[in-house]
Image (tube, rainbow, N blue to C red):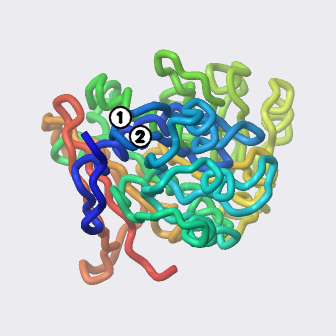
């Protein structure tokens, strides 16, 4: 079967099928590629057969397109290269991909997302077109953009993508009256959360969650080869004891605190290997703190997953820190006025002041519903 030309943004069926495969391949870079974007690539011969595949595993390694081209050899001639992201046009730790692709003899390049990096942003496509290669953009663009969301957010703004993850019963309760909350959602939903952690460079909780749940906050997926996210605990008063899974050395732990924390609490954290960030003497306000800049300089964090409780969730929403909300809803009803809901804090004064969400997506994860939405606000 030959590869048909694309007729528009949706793409012909072969283009869509090959791009879906490229998107799946990109996931091999989960937890490995950052701070580079995850990218997947497929080479189809002129006859329309897959002859090679590739993905990117991190700085200094071959880019997905080059891995695929190297594997394809002479079978690239007259074929099509499918890539989830526009080929790079600049020299980094590896040579630029666009000239290498043009030299390979492929007739077409089909891409998902345009590279948001201002150093590239269309220049890779320009090089290919100038060399006579047909370029088709935007095949499965939404999926391709989602793959690089953290990278795009950081390269365009200097800030990480901040995702607030919450899990609740269908009536919005995160725990019962007695405080029990494990497990509200299903094993399938919890496995999906581990994928969110793998995508993120850091996972953030508050002191209340650290004390009550004693979580590990690590990625525990079968066959996972990527780095573990930085574990961030927001503890302004030194409530978190320096023991338990958060301090087991399996991942970096950063305690974000204030001058109000007792010196012995800070010393205890440091004694077990945690780093400590003192964010002034008053309330911690991330919108006024260089914490995110520090996270990138220290660990190249481009995406932060917030798994805290209702108090931290509302605090970050109120500050305008959150970019995206992921809510898992279990088919259960808990009820009770004293049972905590997903958001605490003061809340809004009037419905007219409610935080608007947009680009809402809903899917089934096992028996649960997963709701993903972007926080609508001026950037």
Q: Residue at x 58, y 51 (%)?
A: 303
Q: Residue at x 81, y 48 (%)?
A: 93
The residue carrying pointer 2 sits among few (fewer than 14), some (14 to 19) or many (20 or more) residues within 10 Å by Cα, namely many
In the figure, 231 relative to 236: above or below?
A: above
Work out whether mark 1 precedes mark 2 in sequence or the reverse, and give the earlier one. 2
**Quadrant in which the N terminus is drawn:** top left
* Disc sitting over residue 290 in the figure: none
Q: Describe residue 4's horizontal placement relative to residue 87 as left or right.
A: left
Q: Describe residue 360's horizontal placement relative to residue 162 as left or right.
A: left
The residue that label 1 is drawn on is 49
* Disc sitting over residue 44 in the figure: 2
Which percent across, then down, holds residue 258? 76, 54
Q: Nearer the viewer, residue 326 or 1?
A: 1
What is the spatial separation of the Cα atoms under label 1 and label 2, in whole angstroms?
5 Å
Q: Nearer the viewer, residue 231 or 233?
A: 231
Tag 1, which secondary structure? Answer: loop
Count how many numbered circles sit on residues in the image: 2
In the figure, 197 relative to 126: above or below?
A: above
CB contact under 8 Å: marks 1 and 2: yes
Which percent across, then down, holds residue 163? 47, 53
Tag 2, which secondary structure? Answer: strand
The answer to which quarter of the image holds residue 355 is bottom left
Which percent across, then down, holds residue 315? 50, 61
The residue carrying pointer 1 sits among few (fewer than 14), some (14 to 19) or many (20 or more) residues within 10 Å by Cα, namely some
Q: Nearer the viewer, residue 355 or 152?
A: 152
């Amino acid at each position: 079967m030959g590869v048909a030309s694309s007729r528009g943004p949706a793409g012909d069926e072969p283009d869509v099928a090959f791009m879906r495969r490229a998107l799946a391949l990109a996931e091999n870079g989960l937890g490995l590629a950052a701070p580079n974007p995850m990218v997947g690539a497929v080479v189809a011969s002129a006859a329309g057969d897959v002859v090679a595949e590739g993905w990117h595993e991190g700085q200094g390694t071959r880019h997905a397109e080059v891995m695929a081209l190297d594997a394809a050899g002479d079978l690239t001639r007259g074929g099509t290269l499918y890539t989830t992201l526009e080929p790079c046009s600049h020299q980094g730790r590896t040579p630029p991909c666009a000239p290498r692709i043009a030299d390979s003899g492929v007739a077409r390049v089909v891409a998902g997302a345009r590279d948001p990096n201002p150093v590239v942003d269309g220049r890779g496509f320009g090089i290919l077109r100038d060399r006579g290669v047909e370029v088709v953009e935007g095949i499965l663009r939404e999926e391709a953009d989602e793959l690089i969301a953290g990278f795009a957010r950081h390269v365009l703004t200097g800030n990480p993508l901040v995702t607030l993850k919450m899990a609740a019963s269908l009536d919005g309760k995160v725990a019962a009256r007695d405080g029990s909350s494990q497990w509200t959602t299903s094993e399938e939903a919890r496995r999906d959360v581990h994928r969110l952690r793998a995508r993120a460079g850091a996972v953030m909780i508050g002191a209340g969650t650290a004390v009550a749940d004693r979580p590990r906050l690590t990625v525990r997926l079968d066959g996972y080869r990527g780095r573990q996210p930085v574990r961030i605990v927001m503890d302004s008063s030194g409530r978190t004891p320096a023991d338990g899974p958060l301090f087991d050395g399996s991942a970096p732990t950063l305690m974000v605190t204030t001058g109000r924390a007792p010196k012995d609490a800070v010393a205890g954290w440091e004694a077990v290997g945690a780093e400590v960030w003192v964010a002034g003497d008053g309330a911690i306000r991330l919108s006024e703190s260089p914490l995110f800049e520090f996270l990138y300089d220290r660990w190249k964090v481009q995406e932060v997953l917030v798994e805290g409780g209702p108090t931290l969730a509302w605090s970050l929403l109120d500050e305008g820190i959150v970019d995206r909300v992921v809510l898992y809803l279990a088919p259960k009803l808990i009820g009770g006025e004293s049972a905590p809901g997903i958001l605490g804090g003061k809340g809004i004064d009037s419905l007219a002041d409610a935080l608007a969400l947009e680009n809402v997506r809903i899917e089934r994860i096992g028996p649960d519903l997963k709701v993903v939405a972007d926080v609508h606000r001026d950037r």
